[in-house]
Image: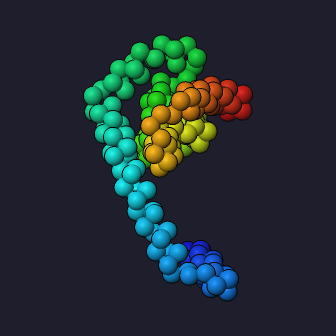
Amino acid sequence: MEQIGAAVVCAVMAVIVAAGYLKGLPVFDLFLEGAAQGVRTAVRLLPTLIGLIAAISMLRASGALELVCGALRPVTEWVGVNPEIVPLALLRPFSGSGATSYVTELYTQYGADSETARLAAILASSTETTFYAAAVYFGGRGFRTTRYAIPAALCGDCMAVVLSLVAVQLFG
């Protein structure tokens, strides 16, 4: 299957180069210009991404995540949800890879077919890495303010958490 994917990528690249050549475009010069522009964009994004990674590391290392999870434990128990889901809901807007590793831990701890694992899967797939996406999109364009984008995206994430809970309660 991997060879088919590699062959498709090569074929698409060949078609693009051939189409550009047939149109009389300076394909290699345009490629170099695009590559240089990509490097400039990556350099512009680097400080934002480093700051985001540092903030996530500090959040996890400081124990603040556990503190918030402990405070929300009575609410999760009242709703009838495993309190181990709270770190996932709090981590997902910041880090996709951190959330994925946490979901994997939940699968290992509770089993892949448990209610906790189903909720974790739905929650992880229905929410967005809000702060990472904002850092990439807004930082890539050089915007200094996000206005209403972050609050609106976080409201969407909150609704995804609520609807994930409802979906698991109704269909789980």
Q: How many marks?
A: 0
Q: How is the image coloured?
A: rainbow
- Location of residue 48 by image quarter: top left
Q: Is residue 105 visible?
A: no
- Location of residue 101 by image quarter: top left
From the viewer's perspective, tell me whether residue 104 is left or right of residue 123.
left
Q: Residue at x 50, y 75 (%)?
A: 31
Q: Is residue 119 visible?
A: yes
Residue 123, position in %: x, y? 58, 36
Where 163 sits versus 30, above or below? Answer: above
Q: Nearer the viewer, residue 123 or 13?
A: 13
Q: Residue at x 61, y 39 (%)?
A: 126
Figure quadrant of the N terminus: bottom right
Figure quadrant of the C terminus: top right
From the viewer's perspective, tell me whether residue 118 is left or right of residue 71.
right
Q: Residue at x 61, y 81 (%)?
A: 25
Residue 104, position in %: x, y? 46, 45
Where 2 sits versus 88, above or below? Answer: below
Residue 153, position in %: x, y? 58, 32
Residue 18, position in %: x, y? 64, 85
Q: Residue at x 40, y 59 (%)?
A: 40
Q: Residue furthest right?
A: 170
